Amino acid sequence: MSAEDYDGGWTPQTRLGRRVRDGEVESMGDALRTGLPIKEPEIVDQLLPGLEDEVLDINMVQRMTDSGRRVKFRCVVAVGNRDGYVGYAEGRDDQVGGAIEKAIGNAKLNIIDVSRGCGSWECGCGRPHTVALRTTGKAGSVEVELIPAPRGLGLAGADTVQHVLRLAGIEDIWTRSSGKTRTTVNLAKATFNALRNTTEARVPEHAREEREVIE
């Protein structure tokens, strides 16, 4: 997106937002590589148009205050473009619609770039259809392990896990989960944390180039 394409409907309040508006940052990958935090959902709207969202769970939560019992709705949402980018978050509000809207906005702020590839020794097709490496994520008592799988296997995991993986663009994978997996919040968060661990385990470009030279 260039500065000329910007329609002026959003006034950025952060450094990254202004760089997106001015056309200095033209893709979500570039935005994440700047190291600047994403604090405005509109940044993701500009760089990843057509982002899909999936409501994973809605619960009513209660809290006692001096004025009595207060009831709110907690919504768990995952967003993704089915092509390597996914986000996860929770939102709370007095109304269901407000909780969903807050959760979607928060999920956009937590967007990550998943490291995909053909990490299974059984495959070797070279397409980015599974995770690039074996990884584990935790949330509360729940632990989710993602294992690269050959092309054609599909998503071998619980429904909640599948929803998150599908939004991330994962087509084939083995999964293993333990703990109180009936808790949707922790199961979804553990899956997201496992995907986030793939981004932290990426091989830096300069290191990859040095290795190639040595080989």
Image (cartoon, rainbow, N blue to C red):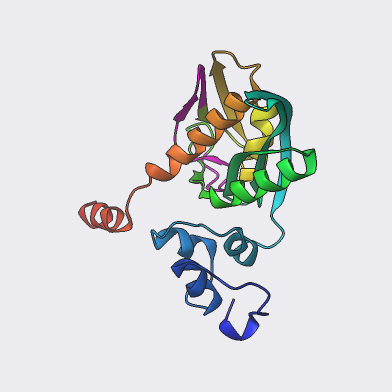
For the N terminus, the quadrant is bottom right
Q: Which x, y percent locates residue 128?
A: 56, 47
Q: Which x, y percent locates residue 203?
A: 34, 48
Pick the front one: 201 or 44: 44
| Residues shaded magenta | 124-145
Query: On the image, which quarter does residue 58 sit in?
Result: top right
Q: Is residue 153 visible?
A: no
Q: Which x, y percent locates residue 114?
A: 51, 46
User: From this viewpoint, which residue is outermost toward the front?
Assistant: 67
Pick the front one: 76 or 117: 76
Q: Residue at x 61, y 44 (%)?
A: 168
User: From this viewpoint, which residue is outermost toward the bottom?
Assistant: 4
Q: Which x, y percent locates residue 66?
A: 62, 26
Pick the front one: 105 or 170: 105
Q: Residue at x 72, y 50 (%)?
A: 52
Q: Residue at x 54, y 13 (%)?
A: 179
Residue 60 to residue 50: above or below? above
Q: Is residue 155 left or right of residue 193?
A: right
Q: Is residue 128 visible?
A: yes
Residue 95 colored magenta? Answer: no
Residue 133 colored magenta? Answer: yes
User: From this viewpoint, which residue is outermost toward the top?
Assistant: 179
Q: Is residue 19 left or right of residue 185?
A: left
Residue 11 to residue 198: above or below? below
Q: Residue at x 54, y 66 (%)?
A: 27
